[in-house]
Amino acid sequence: GAPGFAHRIDEYLQAAIISIEKDRVEVFMRLIPGVAVSSAVLASIDTNADGVLSQDEGRAYADRLRRDLSLSVDGNRLTMRLMSVNFPTVEEMKQGIGEIQIEFSADLPPRGAQSGGARRRLILENHHESRIAAYLMNCLVPRDRNLQVVAQHRNENQSFYELEYMQSAVKADTPFSRWRSATRTSLGALSSFGSMFRLGMRHIAEGTDHLLFLLALLLPAPLALSDSRWAGFAGVRHSLRQILKVVTAFTAGHSITLALGALGVVRVASRPIEVLIAVSILVSAGHALRP
C-alpha cells in the first residue's frame, strides 16, 4: 500500500483550475485556509477587523492574489482581469470549511511565427502566501475542438505549472460547419440541463430544510377550509390541485432567488437567511395547524 496525504489543518490550500479558449484563458481559484491558519488569512482580508468581509475587502484581497500570480503564453506576460469574487462566512473560515472562489480572465495574443505557430505554451506561477500554502494546478479539457492539450508540467509543490497545447487553424465557415456547431451546442445544452436537473433533485433530497418546509406546506393540502379552520377531506382533485400549486410555487420561488443570488443582483449575509429559513418552516407548520 502507498501512503495517503490529506489536506492538513495548518495549510492554506490554493487550487487553480485553468480553462483555455481560442482567444482567452480563464483561471478559477479555490482557496481554503485550514483551521490553524484561518485567523491569519482572515486578518489579511478583514483589514478593518469588524468581523465582516465586505465587497471592497474581497476585491482588495483578490487584487493582492492577482499580483502574486504570473500568467504568460508563448513568453508574453498576460494581464489578468478580475471576473468574480465569492467569500464564505467568517464562521465557516474559522472552522476550516470556508472556500474562497475567485475567477480571473486574460486575453491571449494572436498566434504568429514568433510564438511557434500552432503549438502554444502557457505558464502559471502562484506565490501567494507561500509560507503556509499548499498549491494545486490543473487544466480543463478544452471545449473547442481546435484546441488540444499536449502536455502538463509542474514543479514539486505545484507553484509552477506549464501547459503545452495545440491550436489548429479555424476551418472555413460553411453551412455544414455552422449546422454541426449548432448541433453540438444544442446537445451540450441538453447535457448541461440534464446534469443541472439531477443536481437540483439531489440538492432538494439532501436539504432537510427544504423537505421540512415542503412537508409542512403539503400536510393540509387534502383538507377543506371552513371558518378559518381545517375541515375534512376535500377530495382527490382538490388535493392534487393544491399539491401542484405548492410545489410549483416553491420551485419558482427557489429558482428566482437562486438566479438573483448567482447573478449578484441580491447579496445578503447567509446567517440571517438561515434564520429566516427556520422561521419560514415554523410559519408553515403553524399554518398546517390553523390556517
Image (cartoon, rainbow, N blue to C red):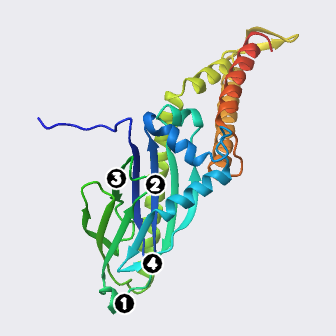
Q: Secondary structure at mark 4?
A: loop
Q: Secondary structure at mark 1?
A: loop
What is the CA distance from the residue labelled 1 to the residue labelled 4? 12 Å
Is residue 241 visible to us here?
Answer: no
Q: Is residue 227 above or below residue 196?
A: above
Q: Which amino acid lies under the numbered mark 2 shown in the image of this protein?
A: Met
Is residue 5 visible to us here?
Answer: yes
Q: Which residue is mark 2?
A: 29
What is the CA distance from the residue labelled 2 to the residue labelled 4? 19 Å
Q: Secondary structure at mark 2?
A: strand
Q: Residue at x 49, y 43 (%)?
A: 99
Q: Residue at x 59, y 37 (%)?
A: 89
Q: Which amino acid lies under the numbered mark 3 shown in the image of this protein?
A: Leu
Q: Earlier in the sequence, mark 3 or mark 2?
A: 2
Label 2, residues with CA under 10 Å away: few <14, some 14-19, many ≥20: many
Q: Which residue is mark 4?
A: 108
Q: Can you give x and y, in whole percent of width and height, for residue 270 in the image?
A: 64, 35
Of discs 2 and 4, which sits in the foreground? 2
In the current view of this chain or complex, which residue is farthest to the bottom? 113
Q: Are marks 3 and 4 in contact (CB under 8 Å)?
A: no
Q: Earlier in the sequence, mark 3 or mark 1?
A: 1
Q: Which residue is mark 1?
A: 112
Of 197 and 61, nearer the camera is: 61
Q: Earlier in the sequence, mark 2 or mark 4?
A: 2
Relative to residue 139, is residue 203 drawn left or right?
right
Q: Can you give x and y, in whole percent of width and height, for residue 164 in the image?
A: 28, 72
